[in-house]
Image (spheres, rainbow, N blue to C red):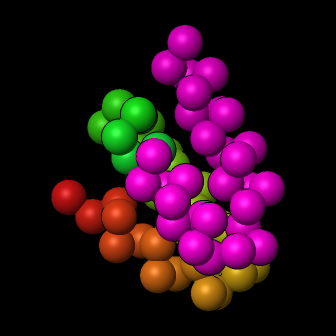
Amino acid sequence: MARAMLEYTKTILNKVSFDANLFCKEVQKAVERLLPYELEELKIFIQSLIQQNPELNQCLVYLKP
């Protein structure tokens, strides 16, 4: 079940990556829902999205411990 939530979160983040505000809100939700090891994988995924959309960089603040 948890793996499904990670994949769902990735899908949503991909879809809202056009808007930094929406993206940040979804990142915040993901931090509340996902397990610590899943958050590490999510960070890698978000870094790849930031390569394509540098304005999303501001959302990394929600992934710091």
Q: Quadrant of the N terminus?
A: top right
* Residue 12 visible: yes
x, y percent for residue 59: 46, 72
Residue situated furthest bottom in the rendering: 55
x, y percent for residue 33: 41, 34
Q: Is residue 8 covered in magenta?
A: yes
Q: Is residue 44 above or below residue 39?
A: below
Q: Quadrant of the C terminus?
A: bottom left
Q: Is residue 20 above or below residue 36?
A: below
Residue in front for this viewpoint, 55 or 42: 55
Q: Residue at x 66, y 33 (%)?
A: 7
x, y percent for residue 63: 35, 60
Q: Is residue 12 above or below residue 57?
A: above
x, y percent for residue 41: 49, 45
Q: Give the side of residue 58 with respect to residue 37, left or right.
A: right
Q: Residue at x 34, y 73 (%)?
A: 61
